[in-house]
Image (spheres, rainbow, N blue to C red):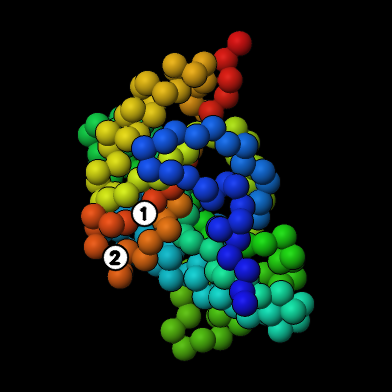
Amino acid sequence: MAIDLKKTLDAYQAKRGVFRIVDVPAMQYLMIDGAGDPNSAPAYARAVSALFPVAYGLKFAAKKDLGIDTVVMPLEGQWHAPDMASFTSRRDKSSWLWMLMIMVPDHITAEMFDAAVGKAATKKDASPILSSVRLETLEEGLCVQTLHVGSYDDETPVLADLHERFVPENGLALTGRHHEIYLSDVRRVEPARLRTILRQPVARLG
């Protein structure tokens, strides 16, 4: 049976209505950058279509060559904007900058990544931006996270509570980019039932 890392790694555990402080270790990810409204910007859909063929190629290569079978991890995104109020109040999605990611296990090497990108490029429907996908290690460190259930547009009050109440009350300061982990397949799950981990890197004051 394939190993499902999102069920075993502490960094992927979150509960609805609970802000939890967690130390997120260094992990490696497939990454691709872009900008604009995720609901309408063509670049967003192109980025997603570039990431997943590489992720599945790595899954099958690891199973065949290493005898290690893991479930492909969910899509993740780091988000930022010139004015962070565009996330918590105005929701000006056109100004959003994003980096889409899929975490891959430690046994995935740079050589395996290069081979997976090369193989994906030979497919008839290959993404034209496969060359923009990269493999990098990210260490977020101290973070606060919670589980949001519902539409992405309904995240606003949760994020406002996190930024304006929980973080200052716990002697913390916002540091890195807003991070979302999409546990549900938006193509198959109605908006009210979407499950998303909301994560915010922080630092302790004093």
Q: Residue 108, position in %: x, y?
A: 71, 66
Residue identified by numbered label 1: 195
Residue identified by numbered label 2: 189
Q: Give the quadrant of residue 104.
A: bottom right
Q: Give the quadrant of residue 105.
A: bottom right
- Amino acid under disc 1: Arg
Name the residue rendered at 63%, 69% in the picture: 3
Q: Residue 9, position in %: x, y?
A: 61, 52
Q: Secondary structure at mark 1?
A: strand
Check if mark 2's residue and mark 1's residue have beta carbons within 8 Å.
yes
Placement of 130 over or under 63, stated as above or below: above
Between 38 and 183, the one nearer to me in the picture: 183
Q: Badge 1, how many Cα within 10 Å: few under 14, some, many 20+?
A: many
Q: Residue 91, position in %: x, y?
A: 25, 39
Q: Secondary structure at mark 2?
A: loop
Placement of 3 over or under 164, stated as above or below: below
- Amino acid under disc 2: Val
Instruction: Residue at the far bottom: name it.
Output: 124
Name the residue rendered at 45%, 52% in the picture: 181
How far apart are the two marked residues, 2 and 1, measured between alpha carbons?
Answer: 9 Å
- Whether residue 117 is visible, yes or no, is no
Q: Give the quadrant of residue 147.
A: top left
- Whether residue 139 is visible, yes or no, is yes
Quarter of the image with the C terminus in it: top right
Placement of 59 over or under 139, stated as above or below: below
